[in-house]
Image (tube, helix red, strand yellow):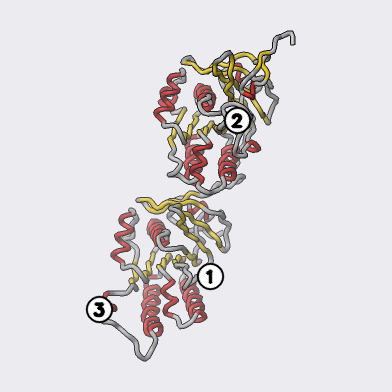
Amino acid sequence: MLEKLQSGILGLDEVLNGGYLPNRAYLVRGQPGTGKTTVGLHFLTAGATAGESSLFITLEEPVAQLQTAAQGLGLDLSTTTFLDLSPTTDFFAKVQTYDIFSPAEVEREPITQMIVEQIESLQPQRIFIDSITQFRYFSANPFQFRKQVLSFLRFLREHKATVLFTSEDSRDAPDDDLQFMSDGVLNLSLENQDRALCVSKLRGSNFQGGRHSLQLTQRGMVLFPRLVPGTRNQALTIETISSGIPEIDELLNGGIERGAITVITGPSGVGKSTLGTQFMKEAAGRGERSVIYSFEESKETLLHRCRGINIAVDAMLERETLSVVQIEPLRYSPDEFASMVRQEVEQHNVRIVMIDSLSGYRLSVRGEELVSSIHALCKYLQNMGVAVLLVNEVETITGDFRATEIGISYLADNIIFLRYIEMEGELRRAIGVLKKRMSNFEKALREFEISRYGVKVGQPLGQLRGILSGMPKFIPDSE
């Protein structure tokens, strides 16, 4: 099996199933500003790091401008050879025209000769051509262009070079022919400030399909591979995680299971996040690490609230058994957020993850399907043996009962609901379990209280009827 060449881009080698196959030609296509040249800069830098000889053939931008751009990204191209075929100022100043022969015939021969001489003398292992679209203007017709490019790529392969070349697909100059001629195609896109990469072709290798989010940062390009359920699995031992509160454990027949997806649902302010944190408090006592991803509440507010109900978050943070990460949903795409979660799970052995809440997570989806993205993330965590807590907010305070309003009930192994009820003129809370896939559970509802001493759960509310309506009625024992 051929050893693949690293792309130099964080996340891209994972999408390419290890990197580029050597001695192949790959097309990088996309509209202006999508990052095509940056892909090439990373490609050449990775080659220089591996001790390979590299050649940059530029037909558009001058070398000085490219070197400045690379330095700004922290990419070292000091050992890379440049062949500058971009137009010089003399072409404009001297107003060069061709009266007998066409410009394509006059320009093509010297440019071709310079490329051949440079490759034969340098024998580069990596070549980046930016952009091959210019070759189209050296050809009299599409047939000649296709023949010329095929011959050129064959010449490069015979010299044992791995080639990346860019094109700019447009209505006037479509690049469908280049996609057929290349061994692999990387498509870059920019829509509504959301950047993405999609691999549509990779001869001789598997790859991760679909749309993968990316960012152009001060250190270059970073790719966030899309999570696909079932690609990562870890041996799972069924184990019950206690909440530390006997009454809640009675409701749940001992607690929630390791690797289970638990939806904690209820209206605003009813105590969903507090209940989730209670499981993390108990896990911290066993030395296990948990993470809260807060999409709505600031980290300081969440910690202050936990301190007020006797949850020792400061000690948990100090011992690193708890991490609270505040997420601005409009800043992160689902792929970026999933990559952040993966890093935490795989590098720090996280055992419980709470997403607070799905309403905030919905904002990060930005037009994509919410259920499919949360499904992929939860299934990944489940396969890794991580207990998942999804905080779901429903809009109704009382009245018609709904577990969720976004269609994720099928995903949940456990559904715990919290509910406001009116008793004796006071607004109180009730807790119950609607679903538990792996075991039986208590069907009764109990009163749920939050005080400065922590969470308190009462005995089953057996003498009340109509609790789910929000206005229960008292039924005497005689009835």
Which residue carries the number 3 mark? 93
Relative vertical location of residue 254 with respect to residue 233 in this rendering, above or below? above
Residue closest to the far left: 93
Amino acid carrying label 1: it is: Asp
Q: Quadrant of residue 255?
A: top right
* Image spot of residue 37 (x, y percent): 40, 62
Disc nearer the start of the sequence (3/1): 3
Left or right, 414 with respect to 198, comes to right
> Is residue 259 in view?
no
Which residue carries the number 2 mark? 258
- The tag on residue 176 is 1
* Image spot of residue 269 (x, y percent): 50, 26
Relative vertical location of residue 453 with respect to residue 29 in this rendering, above or below? above
Residue closest to the far bottom: 100
- Which sits in the foreground, 140 or 448? 448
Mark 3 near mark 1, Cβ–Cβ under 8 Å? no
Relative vertical location of residue 267 with respect to residue 25 in this rendering, above or below? above
